[in-house]
Image (tube, grey):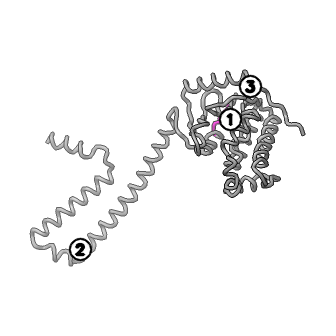
């Protein structure tokens, strides 16, 4: 008896109740059919109304089982997502998929936001609608008195970053892309450029407009003149979204979210080092 109990425990550990029920039902039906076959009654049983009723009940049982398994899978999937979100560091996607988490980080701030990015209009080209939400979140943070210190590339480095992202050889394809058409339609007053240089100027002018708007909201904006391998948005030195900027051709940066104390401390050190040597941004002349 003890051996059977142990065997049962090994067989059914981790197996859900619906699965056990289905197994028992299948074993029972198989046993009944075997008995009928041994008694030479199987053929008459298959031709009888009892078989039709049994088949209906089994089909109903299968539907119920499938439904229970579906909801059980949904429940386990939800638990897996909760576990993933509770991890101190987790992968959240490739830019611009990080922007929703960035907006979340900005919204959680109570005292301070520290930001390093390539440009002030982060995501305005790739996801203009989400960029608009990000700007509104930063605006609300400033209205609550939250300090926002933000570093971006200076003009020379910003242009270098743009030429890496948008090559002159691919200019015609860029003009035909869905992203560019969406960019033109979303931002009022922007005209389609007739040359590659006009295109770069258009993008840079948009960044300056956003930088001016951030300065108007009281954001402390500074520029850095060296390449940065890491961008991040951090709230209250506790929670950050960070992105590796330069990971090779065609890739736009792998993004992660972290609450890891050591990582956050490292990012704060990086920010302090850059901030000391960064140049304050003033409003563009009109």
Q: Position of residue 148 (x, y in %)?
A: 73, 30
Q: State the SS at label 3.
A: loop
Q: Earlier in the sequence, mark 1 or mark 3?
A: 1
Q: Residue furthest front?
A: 169
Q: Quadrant of the C terminus?
A: top right
Q: Is residue 169 something that shows in the picture?
A: yes
Residue holding disc 2: 50
Q: Position of residue 29 (x, y in %)?
A: 21, 63
Give, as a single range, the part of the protein colored magenta: 104-109
Image check: 191 left or right of 269? Answer: right
Q: Position of residue 199 (x, y in %)?
A: 76, 49
Which circle, 3 or 2, is nearer the viewer? Answer: 3
Which residue is at 16% across, 77% downward?
A: 44
Q: Nearer the viewer, residue 160 or 186?
A: 160
Q: Quadrant of the N terminus?
A: top left
Which of the 4 image quarters holds residue 172?
bottom right
Which residue is at 9% across, 68% downward?
A: 38
Q: Nearer the viewer, residue 156 or 178?
A: 156
């Amino acid at each position: 008896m003890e051996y059977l109990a142990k065997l049962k425990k090994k067989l059914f550990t981790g197996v859900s109740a619906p699965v056990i029920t289905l197994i028992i039902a299948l074993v029972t039906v198989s046993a009944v059919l075997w008995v009928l076959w041994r008694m030479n009654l199987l053929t008459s049983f298959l031709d009888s109304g009892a078989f039709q009723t049994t088949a209906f009940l089994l089909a109903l049982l299968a539907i119920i089982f499938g439904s229970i398994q579906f909801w059980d899978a949904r429940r386990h999937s939800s638990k897996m997502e909760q576990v993933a979100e509770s991890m101190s560091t987790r992968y959240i996607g490739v830019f611009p998929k990080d922007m929703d988490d960035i907006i979340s980080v900005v919204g959680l701030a109570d005292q301070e936001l520290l930001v390093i990015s390539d440009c002030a209009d982060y995501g305005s080209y790739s996801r203009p609608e989400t960029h608009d939400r990000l700007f509104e979140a930063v605006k609300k943070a400033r209205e609550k008195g939250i300090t926002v210190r933000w570093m971006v590339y200076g003009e020379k480095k910003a242009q270098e970053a743009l030429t890496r992202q948008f090559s002159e050889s691919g200019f015609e394809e860029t003009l035909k892309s869905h992203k560019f058409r969406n960019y033109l339609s979303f931002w009022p007053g922007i005209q389609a450029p007739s040359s590659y240089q006009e295109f770069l100027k258009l993008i840079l002018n948009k960044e300056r407009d956003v930088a001016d708007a951030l300065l108007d909201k009281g954001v402390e904006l500074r520029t850095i003149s060296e390449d940065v391998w890491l961008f991040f948005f951090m709230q209250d030195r506790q929670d950050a979204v960070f992105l590796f900027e330069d990971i090779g051709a065609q890739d736009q940066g792998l993004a992660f979210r972290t609450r890891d104390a050591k990582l956050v401390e490292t990012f704060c050190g990086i920010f302090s080092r850059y901030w000391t040597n960064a140049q304050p941004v003033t409003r563009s002349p009109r």
